[in-house]
Image (cartoon, rainbow, N blue to C red):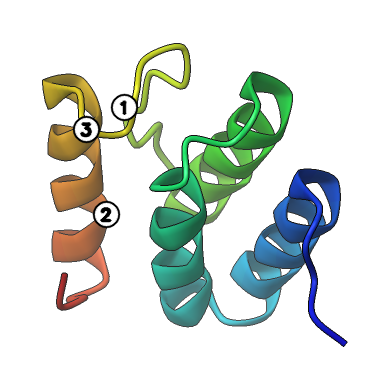
Amino acid sequence: RQVTTPEARSAAVCRALELDPEAGALLALEFLGTDPPLFFGQSVVEKLGDVMGEAPGFDVSQPFAAAVNQEAAAKVAKRYQLKR
């Protein structure tokens, strides 16, 4: 069954971050790249920060393509050695 609502996707990404931070981080970047509704994006950013032990630096009020978010995404990708 495919997870399609922003709420369900956000919950799935947060759970993935808990279970496997590296895979969860990749899912988080993919989810944030869809410019989800503010609340659900913020939930994922907060969980990502919890797992990383520091705020990743995303500004969910701006599009994912914004410079601040691209810098944050690069920080996450570097931390988990993700290929983007």
**The C terminus appears in which quarter of the rendering?**
bottom left
Q: Which residue lies under the disc numbered 3?
A: 65
Quarter-wise, where is residue 70 in the image? top left
Q: Which mark is residue 57?
A: 1
Q: Is residue 17 above or below residue 66?
A: below
Q: Is residue 72 above or below residue 75?
A: above
Foreground disc of the pair 3, 2: 3
Residue at screen point 73% across, 59% down? 9
Q: Is residue 13 above or below residue 64?
A: below
The kind of residue on which mark 3 rests is Ala
Q: Position of residue 5 (x, y in %)?
A: 81, 52
The kind of residue on which mark 1 rests is Gly
Distance between the Cα atoms at labels 2 and 1? Answer: 9 Å
**The N terminus appears in which quarter of the rendering?**
bottom right
Mark 2 lies on a secondary structure that is helix
Mark 1 lies on a secondary structure that is loop
Q: Which mark is residue 76?
A: 2
